[in-house]
Image: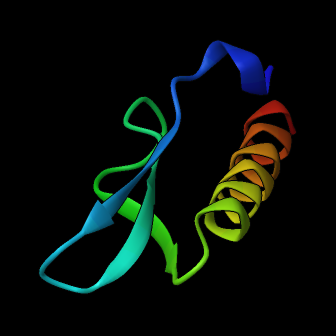
Amino acid sequence: MMADYPKFVKWSNADRVYVGFCPDLFIGGVCHGENENRVYAELCRLISEEMESLSS
């Protein structure tokens, strides 16, 4: 379940983009972009794909 995993988006001053993180599933940032909401949506999509992969 995606809600069971902490996920967050934070601004990177070094890269000047938002970076999405889910530390329980991925090491480091897994997606990035200029729009915080889009990065969060992409992060949720990646988590969902990973959950499907793990349940197969």
> Is the image coloured rainbow, by chain, by secondary structure, or in one colour?
rainbow
Reply above or below: 5 against 33: above
Reply above or below: 18 against 16: above
The residue shown at (62%, 66%) is 39
Q: Residue furthest top?
A: 4
Q: Which of 5 and 8 is in front in this view?
A: 8
Q: How many marks?
A: 0
Indicate the quadrant containing the C terminus: top left, top right, bottom left or bottom right. top right
The residue shown at (17%, 75%) is 13
35 sits left or right of 24 in the view: right
The residue shown at (28%, 85%) is 16
Indicate the quadrant containing the N terminus: top left, top right, bottom left or bottom right. top right
Location of residue 36 in the rendering, given as x and y in whole percent from the top left corner? 58, 64
Q: Which of 50 and 42 is in front in this view?
A: 42
Location of residue 28 in the rendering, given as x and y in whole percent from the top left corner? 28, 56
Location of residue 55 in the rendering, given as x and y in whole percent from the top left corner? 83, 31
- Quadrant in the picture for residue 54: top right
The residue shown at (32%, 63%) is 11
Reply above or below: 2 against 35: above
Q: Residue furthest left?
A: 14
Location of residue 41 in the rendering, given as x and y in whole percent from the top left corner? 76, 58
